[in-house]
Image (cartoon, helix red, strand yellow):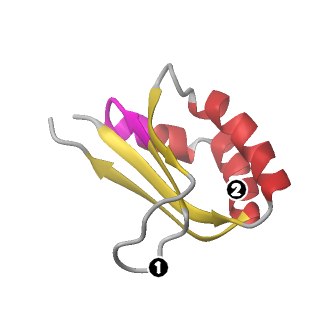
Amino acid sequence: MPAYLIVNYNVENTEQYGEYSAAAGPVLQIGEKAKLVAFDGDSQKLEGAPGHQTVVLAFDSMDEAKEAYHSGEYQKLAKVRLDATSNHFAVLVNGIG
């Protein structure tokens, strides 16, 4: 069953975020183990208080998504993203078979 990693935030430091962005694809193996489904820098708020940027990655399974997100290499990189952004959240969700 597919799984999706959905992250949302406001970019506050574009230079620092650029460092994260350049490294995130290879670290998360986008194009190999993960598929970039959406990358929107102008997300339209409907409810709540989301940030303006949303990224959605698809993985073949929840286990693969967890492995990618919780890997030591990504967690070091995630700190860069967290420092460069505000109002952030990340969720893993199961897809429909």
Question: Label 2's element?
Answer: helix
5 sits left or right of 12 in the view: left
Residue 64 locus on image (x, y percent): 41, 34
Q: Which residues are magenta?
A: 57-65
Q: Residues within 10 Å of mark 2 (few under 14, many from 20)?
A: many
Q: In the rendering, which numbered label is found on residue 81?
A: 2
Residue at horizontal 48%, vertical 39%? Answer: 67
Q: In the rendering, which numbered label is found on residue 97?
A: none
Relative height, residue 36 to residue 95 (above, below): above
Q: Please name whichever residue, 76 or 19, is drawn nearer the observer in this view of the structure.
A: 19
87 sits left or right of 78 in the view: left
Q: In the rendering, which numbered label is found on residue 49?
A: 1
Relative height, residue 78 to residue 89 (above, below): above
**Residue 47 highlighted magenta (yes or no):** no
Residue at horizontal 27%, vertical 35%? Answer: 2
**Residue 60 highlighted magenta (yes or no):** yes
Q: Amino acid at mark 1?
A: Ala
Residue 44 locus on image (x, y percent): 43, 65
Q: Amino acid at mark 2?
A: Arg
